[in-house]
Image: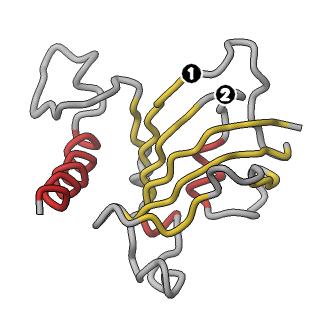
Amino acid sequence: SEEKKKKAREGKGLNAKEKTVSAVSSTKVEKQSEAKSSQSRTLENGLTIEKLAMGKPNGKIASPGKEVSVHYIGKLQKNGKTFDSNGGKRPFKFRLGVGDVIRGWDVGVNGMRVGDKIRLTIPPSLGYGAKGARPAIPPNAWLVFDVELVDVR
């Protein structure tokens, strides 16, 4: 179906984007994917953080030890299937940087400002690893989370 092809292209785009993160600022452009945003960075461990929207410049900043509240949608990168979401519900609260959530969230949410929206592409090593989280998350799954920071306390 056309939708499956589109999702497959989007999934491939994420992998291409990882390789071309700094292509925008570099004079030597290699294989630049059609990046929606130049606000994307990949850390050594494979975690990609893409800024989708900016919050208030003076918004509170998420930092380790703070309680943060987020809205999120979690999808499997492989097929784009949503496995978890709290959109339209009360924000999900957790203490940042203390292992309350998967490592990809502890790393990715750190430094966000209230109102920021990001997309985290999380490798299995920073997600649910070789075991996965059955039934929704298979072993060795790459995850994509759209996260909006609602509050920091």
In the orientation shown, which residue stands out farthest toward the right? 153
Q: Are marks 2 and 1 in contact (CB under 8 Å)?
A: yes
Q: Is residue 139 or residue 28 the one in the foreground?
A: 139
| Of the image marks 2 and 1, the number of the one nearer the N terminus | 1
Amino acid on which disc 2 is placed: Gly
Tag 1 secondary structure: loop
Residue count near mark 2 (Cα–Cα under 10 Å), binned few <14, some 14–19, many ≥20: many
Residue at position x 39%, y 53% from top? Answer: 46
Which label number is shown at residue 92? none
* Residue, disc 1: 54
Amino acid on which disc 1 is placed: Met
Q: Is residue 28 or residue 144 the one in the foreground?
A: 144
Q: Can you give x and y, in whole percent of width and height, for residue 79 in the image?
A: 29, 66
Residue 34's place in the image compared with 46, above or below, is above
Residue 136's place in the image compared with 39, above or below, is below
Q: Quadrant location of residue 29? A: top left
* Residue, disc 2: 115
Residue at position x 56%, y 34% from top? Answer: 117
Please state, as top left, top right, bottom left or bottom right, where the C terminus lies in the image. top right
Residue at position x 67%, y 12% from top? Answer: 57
Q: Quadrant location of residue 92? A: bottom right
Residue at position x 65%, y 56% from top? Answer: 86
Colour basis: secondary structure
Residue 104's place in the image compared with 140, above or below, is above
Looking at the image, residue 8 sits to the left or right of residue 108; the answer is left
Tag 2 secondary structure: loop
Distance from disc 2 to disc 1, alpha carbons, whole Å, reads 7 Å
Q: Can you give x and y, in whole percent of width and height, for residue 131 in the image?
A: 49, 86
